[in-house]
Image (spheres, grey):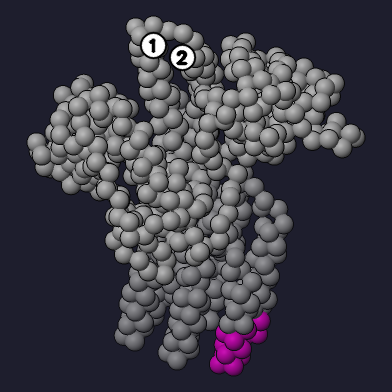
Amino acid sequence: MVQNRGFIEDSTTKIDFMTRKQAELVYGGTYLSQMASIIIGTLFASVIFFWTSRNDVWIWLVIQISMSVGRIILFRFYRSHACNDTTTYNWLNFHFFAVMLSGIVWASGSIIYFKQDDPVVCFFIAMIIAGVVSGALPNLAPHFPSFCVFAAPMLLVFAVRNLVAGKVEFYVLAALTILFAGVLISSARFFNRILLDTFRLNIEKDSLVENLKLERTAAETANNAKSDFLAAMSHEIRTPLNGVLGMIGVLEGTPLSDQQRGYVKTIHLSANALLSLISNILDFSSIEAKKVVVTRLPFDPSAVCREVAELFDFTVKSKGLSLLLHIDSKFAGNFIGDANRIRQILINLVGNAVKFTEKGTIELKLQVQDENEDGVLFHFSVCDTGVGIPADKMPLLFNKFSQISESLKHRAQGSGLGLAICKGLVTILGGEIGVDSNISKGSCFWFKIRLAGSNQSEITSPATCVEMVPPVESGILDGLHVLVADDVELNRMIMVINLEKEGCRVDVAENGVEAAEMAMKSNYDIILMDCIMPQMDGYEATVKIRELELASNRHVPIIALTANAIVGEREKCIVAGMDDFLTKPFNIEEVLAAIRRWSKR
């Protein structure tokens, strides 16, 4: 029943729309058509009077002009009052009857002043009728019944009058009139169908546009919901994971037996694997949403390759493999680009190579292909002696959540996002990525990116840049007064243990209200501010602290500690008044480096 009702409502809407359009078209040409009708009527009456000397033709002309004026007045009323669909049918009916009366008036003139003994007058009347009916076709065809009641009285009555005249020339004129009537009515019908089809297409187009708008709104809502979900899950997962990794770090700094240290290492690897999975999901979401921020900073591509090789050195040796590093020294030094994104791509590629290689070697190569005014084209490649990839599986490699075979999927677990992320990042960086492989001989993944020389491009440091810093020496922060604001007790405990180990004096706050109050009572050197807290979050607390600082002409550095690793979070923190940004889970070296950077020690 609901579907039938919807269908009926939709059909009613279409009929109302077409009726309204028909009324607009037939009324729209009223002024021009009726002025033409008055002129032609005056010409008709003048010629008839000249040939027949009948004074009653002027009475006919007054009636004809009155009909035209009446239609003009009707049109004025239509424009003033026909403002809603509920009256459209009535106005269309009014127009129908007005047109019918006009047709009757013209038909009466053709009969009353028909001169059976003068074919010239009859042919003149025929020409006038043909001209009037033809001129009415464009204006009345949108409403086919109106055209019929206007044309039929004039043409058919005139044809009948010719037939009863009893002369051959009038028979011919009658036949021509009937043929002309058939052609005009057929043309009007055809024109009417085209207009109605156009109206229907417009309705369907408008409906399609409306549906597309609704679908776009639904898609945007779904995308926003996905972003909100990812933000929530990022925060909820990263917060306890920060505690896990933090306590592992604390535990590794205590005396442990070899067996215990092995257990702790396994826990650490598992936690890092979970963190990598979360980061991959967020990275892929950012790539799909086209919200990846690309930095342009000077860096040494060869140094990035060395860092990646050192990162995998222990893992490669533990599997009995060899990791070879080949760097083209033709172009050494700094180039402008996004070192972090290139490092992320290489880590994914080398990680896959290690995962799918049981014996042999892995080669990380950096070569220079060409140089032009836009910069240097670097060719990065990671080759292995692993299982290789079947040719029919190659097109699937860079798709999301894809694995080349079920056996490999079970042997080497992963999110299936690594290569999709690599392709997305390479594309964003303006490069290209590909793979060459042979079964049982290995695979070679490569990507090319053009980097400008450090003297060829302006160096800018956007807010989203993550700086790679060395570990901070123990004891360098002795006596530093630090406020840690975090609603999670475990996070506060980890921070206190690590900061006190470095000689800092640490106070803690459980929410933004406490943090703002304590910041005004004590002269802290640094505030580590969690962003999501009860009662008052870190953003509000920062805004309040900055407002209160205006009176005292102070500025305490505030470093954001957040588990929301989504795009735009850093900017949100900066707008609130924070000075720096760290994403949970973080290692203590990152925290100490940030503290050193902002405490100027």
* Classed neighbour count for the residue bearing mark 1: other residues with Cα under 10 Å, few (<14), some (14–19), many (≥20): some
| Res 428 seen here | yes
Q: Any mark on residue 261, and which?
A: 1
Task: Give the residue at x 58% y 82%.
Answer: 40
| Residue occupying the far right of the picture | 551
Q: Quadrant of the N terminus?
A: top left
Q: Does the residue at mark 1 contact the one at mark 2 (Cβ under 8 Å)?
A: yes
Q: Which residue is mark 2?
A: 252
Nearer-the-camera pick, 219 or 422: 422
Horizontal and vertical percent for residue 494?
58, 15
Left or right of 319, for residue 131: right
* Classed neighbour count for the residue bearing mark 2: other residues with Cα under 10 Å, few (<14), some (14–19), many (≥20): some
The residue type indicated by label 2 comes to Glu
In the displayed structure, would residue 110 be above or below residue 501? below
In the displayed structure, would residue 236 be above or below residue 291? above
Task: Give the residue at x 18% y 47%.
Answer: 436
| Res 206 seen here | no
Q: Main secondary structure of the magenta part?
A: helix
Q: Earlier in the sequence, mark 1 or mark 2?
A: 2
In the displayed structure, would residue 273 be above or below residue 55? above
Q: Which residues are magenta?
A: 42-58
Horizontal and vertical percent for residue 112?
54, 77
